[in-house]
Amino acid sequence: MKQKLVYIGTSSVGIQKIIESNLFDFTKAICEKKRVSDEYLNRIDKNNLQLYTFETKEEFVNIIQQYNRNEYIFLIYQLDFIIPSVLTNAYLFFNLHAGDINTNRGAHPIIWSILNNDKTTDFTLHQINEKIDQGVLVTKYSINIEITDGVDEIKTKMEMGFNLILNQLDCFIKGDLHGTIIQGGIYRKPICEHHYTIDLNDSKEIIENKIRSQKSYRGAVLYFENNKYFVDKLIEYNLKSNKRIGYKLENKLITLNLPNITYVFQINL
């Protein structure tokens, strides 16, 4: 008999991967109301799933408590808050974390992987408790990060490991796979604007990492001459420049000629 599974999250890819695996009795999904997209609804309708939405954490708790704790497990992928202990102490929750549990706990792990210039990272499945990215490590899917990869490229690579991870989850539930207790790990704070704001004292590598960390969004931030710009590419970084000090904004390029260095940024107007 297949394990009954409820999917919690905003990713329509997660829905499709669970359906394709054919490993679970999957008929129900839960998503924050404001995060339900047209694509998400199409996946729900196409697969004849029941969708439950919530706007507050209290509503979320009430939805979960309607389920029989002995029948269902819950799989989370992309949820913006921590499951309270009143639920984790009573139900089995599993979370897909887009980062290495040992070095990259917390929110926005893919962006942190880019900012930290990581060469590899993990798509991690763990049984959660009330603490942030703690509990029992079930399995992980490791990927390489290329110097040109942004958030979307890294997420796509991770999601290629969905089938392996779901198979491992099935084995874990059946008792054929034993997890490992997660101990510690580096916690990363939620990303704020200052994390991807370009400091003109930054190295070329740091500037490029800040830019690619925001490639899927509006761009890295640059403040200059009391103006705010969104940067999507570093065109030139010349440490031997002897050009006249000054700056120029033309079309989508801003050129900064500073003492002994020239920057040319492509900006998002």
Image (spheres, rainbow, N blue to C red):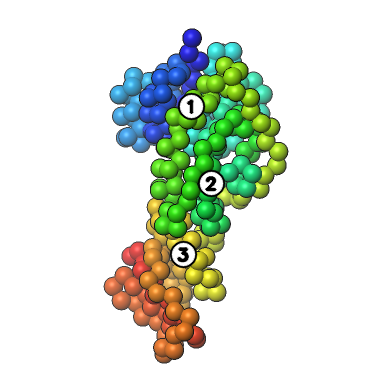
Nearer to us of marks 3 and 2 is: 2
Nearer to us of marks 3 and 1 is: 1
Tell me, for residue 166, which label it has, or none: 1
Q: Are marks 3 and 1 in contact (CB under 8 Å)?
A: no
Q: Is residue 65 visible?
A: no
Residue at x 69%, y 32% (from the top left corner): 181
Residue 178 location in percent, x, y?
63, 24
**Residue 244, placed above or below residue 16:** below
Dot 1, crowdedness within 10 Å: few (<14), some or many (≥20)?
many
Q: Looking at the picture, which amino acid does disc 2 mark?
A: Thr
Element class at badge 1: helix
Is 50 left or right of 98, judged from the image as shown? Answer: left
Q: Give how far apart the Cα atoms at labels 3 and 1 are.
A: 35 Å
Identify the residue position indicated by label 2 in the image. Answer: 121
Residue 167 location in percent, x, y?
49, 25
First-in-chain label (3 vs 2): 2
Q: Are marks 2 and 1 in contact (CB under 8 Å)?
A: no
First-in-chain label (3 vs 1): 1
Dot 2, crowdedness within 10 Å: few (<14), some or many (≥20)?
many
Tell me, for residue 208, which label it has, or none: 3
First-in-chain label (2 vs 1): 2
